[in-house]
Amino acid sequence: MKQPLVSVIVTTYNNQATLEECLNSIMEQTYPDLELIIVDNYSTDETLDIARRFTRKVYTKGPERCAQRNFAVQHAHGKYVMIVDSDMELTPQVVEQSVDRMQSDENIKGVIIPEESFGEGFWAQCKRLERSFYVGVDWIEAARFFERRTFNAIGGYNEALVSGEDWDLSQRVGMLGSIAHIEALILHNEGRLKLLRTLKKKFYYAGQFQTYTSTRAKQSATHGSQPTNIVLRRFGLYFAQPVKLFKKPHHGIGMLFMKISEFGFGALGYVVASRKRRRAEAA
């Protein structure tokens, strides 16, 4: 019997370093009935050339990944859609297990796929350790696999969001049914992680996070939405498993330093953005 089509959606922007491995991992899935859709945000490197070697369904759309993903789903034909970032590599059974899980219970509306980081250098190893604490933690992990009609029923990604959009979508899907998990992993390629670059990204995305928290407040906010709660709960996760945290003490201490620095830069970004918004509203 023919299996339902799965539309795998990859959004890109200057991702030539990681895209080929990402797309190879999609082509090597054990599940045969796939449609690959790539939506690029006006890349200036070799991203588009790489993308066109794998599929004819390559589009250009901006300004941010929420708009790219919604655009891709509009052009998808699959019963299911899966959202993949271009620095991710799928282990072979990700799609097969996701379809099986969705079909096992009609109340399941989304599937969370656990992630494991890899990369080069000390900070990448610290990030790998950090991400290992999040597997199976529903308030951190977000679903990436949905039935297309469910995605459309909730209106897709909120294009006003630049930060927190995965949580927002997963939480809205969860209002329609349950969110399930699979065991197959997504491998997240951190590359050669640089601490300063990571902190700059945290500053930028935290500055956009207020839109997410405001959105959740309007939709009846969850207990994990506020920045202070998120910080405390995450450190609670780390110290709840001290053996894992300090099995390799230099990585554990490095990870804690990295997270303290990230939250510090994030708080600064959040405050700066809040002040800018208040000045704009008062003008």
Image (cartoon, rainbow, N blue to C red):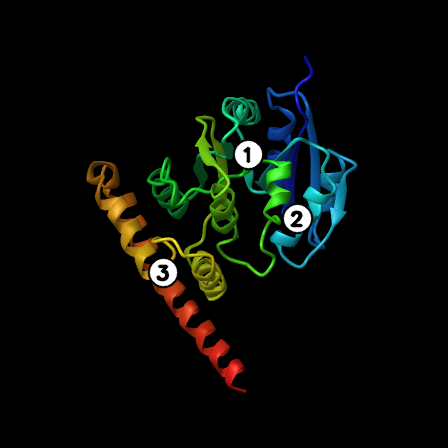
> What residue is rendered at 37% in x and 66% in y?
267
Q: Residues within 10 Å of mark 2 (few under 14, many from 20)?
A: many
Please state the horizontal and vertical placement of residue 111, each as a whole percent of the image. 50, 33
Q: Quadrant of residue 226?
A: bottom left
Query: In the picture provided, is 274 more to the left or to the right than 252?
Result: right
Q: Which residue is mark 1?
A: 89
- Which residue is the extreme one toward the right? 56
Q: Quadrant of residue 259?
A: bottom left
> What residue is rendered at 40% in x and 72% in y?
271
Quarter of the image where the C terminus is located: bottom right
Please state the horizontal and vertical placement of residue 262, each as a whole percent of the image. 37, 58
Q: Which residue is mark 2?
A: 70
Badge 2 amino acid: Asn
Query: In the picture provided, is 228 more to the left or to the right than 110?
Result: left
Q: Quadrant of residue 31?
A: top right
> Which of labels 1 and 3 is toward the front?
3
Q: Nearer the viewer, residue 13 or 180?
A: 180
